[in-house]
Image (spheres, grey):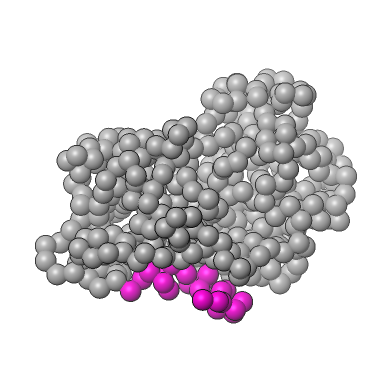
Amino acid sequence: MTLNRRDFLKWSGAGVAAAFAGCATPPSGPRAHVVVVGAGFGGATCAKYLRQWNPNLDVTLIEPNDKFVSCPISNWVLGGLRSMDDITHGYGNLPKHGIKMVKDSVVAIDTDRRVVKTRGGASIGYDRLVLAPGIEILTDTVKGFTEAEAAGKVVHAWKAGAQTALLRKQLEAMPDGGTFVMSVPAAPYRCPPGPYERACMVAYYFKQAKPKSKIILLDGNPEIASKKALFTDAWSTLYPGMIDYRPNNAPLAVDGDRMIVSTEFDEVRGDVLNVVPRQRAAEVCALAGARNDSAGNWCTVNLATFESTGAPNVHVIGDSVGAALPKSGHVATNHAKVCAAAIVELLAGRAPDPIPVIANTCYSATSGSTAGYVAHVYRFDAVKGYVAQPEGGATAKGDTKNFGFAESWSKNIWADVVG
């Protein structure tokens, strides 16, 4: 099968997984109960499509936060292009789909009895459980980070919300001529191009408001991990001399009193410190026995259904999955749709789609009016996993057209997730 660019963009925007995997037929019989943990890009989408594709399912969505704050576009807040209100969305529409919302956190999972227990004391049974909790930031891998974070001297801001707003305030308070020190964790991590886009957005803000300032970008990887051509072009043409990029420089320690980040090679002083430590699947996955790769960091799953290889009847979607797919918001929504379709089929005693398809579209802003993209389609192969198809690619230079596409993408995907 081949896709032209128009079809690719159409299916990518609408959720290519739905196009290939969303033709499930509701079964008859007793109502099954699916519990979804985490109401982000993956969890909220999965809960919605479970109900859409089988209205006879009971679906409970457990989420401790009052609102959904989008990580994609959060870097635009740091650049002054958007406000926190622009990336914050309520969950009020989800109950309209017949989803039961529970504002709580999961503290225990009994996979034998198929019961989750919440911090508030509830015990909730399930036929199928979907875990979509995102990532856990390994702050203890950077010496001194926990203490400096508690003192407000360093943030990671890799979970959009309060730290995003705090980092913006710190940038605003920084003197012209100051230094912003930020880091990129060693792969794999959430949103591979995100740190490099953040450098662009902060540089854009500095260029407008603090032109004597500079950025030191400490990368735990040997080179730019995503969209290298796009970012090297932006840094050299839009922000010459402003961004000091240092590969193979993972932060080892933070001194919040002296405002210093230490690497294997240097002690780097900054006025604002934005250190992003390494990551792994969130703790709730470990509660289910699903954080089960060789290092105990990520979740291995049957990629046709996203059922855990270590915990039967438990599915894991989104950034917690250890697979050769980008950890992006768009991919998480596609995980969600493939998983939802598979659960509908499994509960009906039917075989799920053996060759689901996943798409990824990811835009990165390079200035206040330019952006570039990477986009690919992945088809499942039982032996090789998800294999990238010839369609798609990446831009080597940002432009205004893709900046407009990025704005439209964000509005459309937010509507799909919580609309």
Looking at the rendered image, the quarter that the C terminus falls into is bottom left
Q: In this view, does 159 lie above or below 395?
A: above
Residue 191 visible in the shown view = yes
Residue 40 location in percent, x, y?
Answer: 43, 53
Magenta span contains residue 5: yes
Q: Quadrant of residue 42?
A: bottom left
Residue 108 in the magenta stretch? The answer is: no
- Residue at image position (25%, 73%) is 25
Identify the magenta region: 1-23
Would you identify the image quadrant in which residue 215 lies? top right
Picture mark count? 0
- 140 with respect to 102 (left or right): right
Residue at 55 percent across and 76 percent down: it is: 2
Main SS, magenta region, reads helix
Residue 96 in the image: above or below residue 159:
below
User: What residue is rendered at 68% in x and 31% in y?
Assistant: 250
